[in-house]
Amino acid sequence: MRAPRFVTRALVTSFLTVALVLGAVFGVLSLQVREQVRRSVADNLAAGQQVFTRLEARRQSDMRAAVATLAENPTLKAALDVWLTERGNPSDRTGREVLATVQREADKIAARAAADVLAVADSHGRIVASSGRLSAAWPRGATIGRAASGDLPDRAATVGSGRYHVVSVPLQLAEAVIGSLELGTALDSGYARELADLSRGHVAMLSNGTVLGTTLNATTARDLAALGDGALGDPRIATLDGESWAIQPLSRLGDVTFVALASVDDAAVNQTAAALRSLAWVALGAMLLAGLGSVWLARTLTRPIDDLSQSLSKMISAGPAHQSLPLSGSSRELDQLTFTFNALMASLVSAEDETEATYLGAVRALAAALDARDPYTAGHSERVSRFSVAMGEELTLDAESIETLRLGALLHDIGKIGVPDEVLRKPGVLSPAEFEAIKTHPTAGARILRSIAFLAPHIPIVELHHERPDGLGYPYGLRGDDIPLFARIVHVADAFDAMTSARAYRSGRIPVEAIAELRRGIGTDFDGPSVDALIAALPKLVTASEPFDPVVFQWAPHRARSA
């Protein structure tokens, strides 16, 4: 698996950093929103409790005032007084008529009073008549409990199997209290819903660990009852049915506790969602800015490094580059790295130049050492190299090929080091055995070069420069294009210099004769394009010390040697 690019790592790191920061912000914001919601819910419940207290007090006061006005009913008072006076020994008919009158007047008052049940009671709290939707639960003769002090306040009372919020209004005849009007409101879920509308939340009514009425679901109500009445005297946060709830006491009525509740989780979800939606837009903008900043930062950091990396790649594939990289100016560290790299490249170029100079010197020394063995061949390797290079340029070879050709031509006869002097310097015609000894020099030269790694590209020239297109060459008898081009070029240059140079046993030919001989051998002994390249290059090979005559194709020094 390939390692990611530095720019990719920089972008990923920047985005991960931004993502982590935003995640932390989201987390902290969620906690803060939740805490603020808890306080807000508790504050709202507290404010609702104050409003509830005032509204409930006014409602009860208005209802008491209205019933007190209705209680000034002379017919009701007279009928109740008669019934109370004569109930010890009344006639059946009179008692029924009096009770019917009391009931009729109670029905009239109940129709105008906002209560579940209205009862006319005697001074001992026994019901004489009742009216309203729950009148069946308050039968005649049942007793409604009174406050211990006997001042008939609002109270919670148990009548039959139900619990009621009871408001008492006295019935006075002259200066005596002959009874009372009892207004009862059932402490059930209906009453809880009315209170919830006033308190702006859920409401529950508890008595001795029992929920009398509530707007909560059954599971939440059960968990609330498990807290106990004593735990509900002060505002608090509690977990009910797995949710966090704010609980605010509203009031107490005897042993009945009224509390308002609000779900913190529900409020937190809504407010957190709203806050997170707003933050999401901020996060999107932050991510876009972070992306742009990351791209800019990554490019700023990585461009100089990429330049260095590309330069190193070029150096590996094509050798050291000679042009120094400019300082980026983006950071001191990158500039120091670029400076160090430039210094390293300069050192490599210098070392390469020194190595090349040493290399060329060694090659020339080998060629000179070979030429020194025979004064008649002095300078032969240098001339063959010069001819070969000029021919390669005519054939439009690239610079690297030209260099390979130059050095290969210098070394083409290096194998003759192993040929005995008596054979190499023999003034006469060689015997077959001696010629066979001479023919070993290409393979001997190749053997010598194989032991030196950097001379490997020149081995084909040294080993094959005596091969011929007709297959009669040596050492392998290769034909036509099977012979490498460099070897074909050097073969033509070697033959031309040999023909135009004097030997101990003959004079050198003039260039025109040598060219004619080369032309006659095209296709058999010599490669045609190589011969044409030599002919085209001859004018360029002339120096000021060797004037060139285009008519006779000869140099003055060669003519002198021929003479």
Image (tube, rainbow, N blue to C red):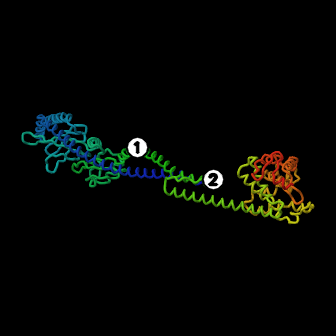
Q: Which residue is mark 1?
A: 277
Residue for point 63% across, 58% down: 349
At 22% from the left and 39% from the top, the residue drawn is 117
Sort mark 2 into few (<14), some (14-19) or many (20+) by Cα contacts within 10 Å.
few
Q: As displayed, is residue 529 above or below residue 436?
A: above
Farthest-out residue, left: 175
Q: Nearer the viewer, residue 514 or 252?
A: 514
- Residue type, mark 2 in image: Lys
Q: Nearer the viewer, residue 420 or 311?
A: 420
Q: Which residue is mark 2?
A: 314
1 vs 2, front mark: 2
Image coordinates of residue 362 in percent, x first then y, are 73, 63
In the image, residue 141 lies at what x, y percent? 19, 43
In which quadrant of the rendered image does the N terminus lie? bottom right
User: How far is the residue under mark 1 from the one under mark 2?
Assistant: 52 Å
Residue at 21% from the left image edge and 50% from the top image edge: 254
The image quarter containing residue 63 is top left
Q: Quadrant of the C terminus?
A: bottom right
Q: Nearer the viewer, residue 27 or 415?
A: 415
**Rendering coords of residue 508 (x, y %):** 86, 55
